[in-house]
Amino acid sequence: MDAAELRSKIAAAKRRLVTAEGEMETALHQIGEAPRPDKRIISTALSAAFAELKAARQDLSDLEQVLAQG
């Protein structure tokens, strides 16, 4: 993997983090305002956003390790 490709992958991972964090913030705000039946829908969205956040953080960590090695 060359440096340009690595920088591109790091930028993509950072974008995923920003997107996931924004989705989580929105969901958390909506939970407080939602009627009880809607809380399950919001909880599902929040779980999906959290999974994306974890995956993006792992990708970023992996890419940073590659940079540190080379």
Image: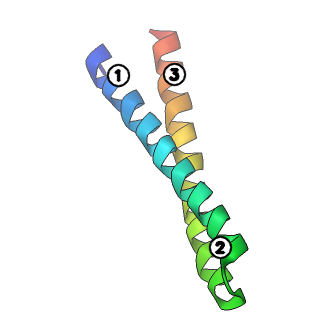
**Mark in the foreground, 2 or 3:** 2
Q: Nearer the viewer, residue 38 or 52?
A: 38
The image shows residue 65, relative to residue 16, as above or below, that is above
Q: Secondary structure at mark 2?
A: helix
**Mark in the foreground, 2 or 1:** 2
The disc, 2 or 1, on the residue closer to the chain's N-terminal end is 1
The amino acid type, in three-letter code, at marker 3 is Glu
Residue at the bottom extreme, as displayed? 37
Q: Nearer the viewer, residue 4 or 17?
A: 17
The amino acid type, in three-letter code, at marker 2 is Ser
Q: CA distance from mark 2 to mark 1?
A: 34 Å
Q: CA distance from mark 2 to mark 3?
A: 31 Å
Q: Which residue is mark 2?
A: 43
Residue at the front extreme, as displayed? 33
Please indicate whether residue 17 sits to the left or right of residue 54 in the image. Answer: left
Q: Which residue is mark 3?
A: 64
Q: Secondary structure at mark 3?
A: helix
Q: Nearer the viewer, residue 27 or 65?
A: 27
Q: Which residue is mark 1?
A: 7
* Quadrant of the snapshot with the N terminus: top left
The amino acid type, in three-letter code, at marker 1 is Arg
Residue at (49, 42) in percent of width and height = 18
Q: CA distance from mark 1 to mark 3?
A: 10 Å
Q: Nearer the viewer, residue 21 or 13?
A: 21
Q: Position of residue 46 (x, y in %)?
A: 61, 65
* Quadrant of the snapshot with the C terminus: top left
Residue at (62, 85) in percent of width and height = 38
- CB atoms of marks 1 and 3 within 8 Å: no
The disc, 2 or 3, on the residue closer to the chain's N-terminal end is 2
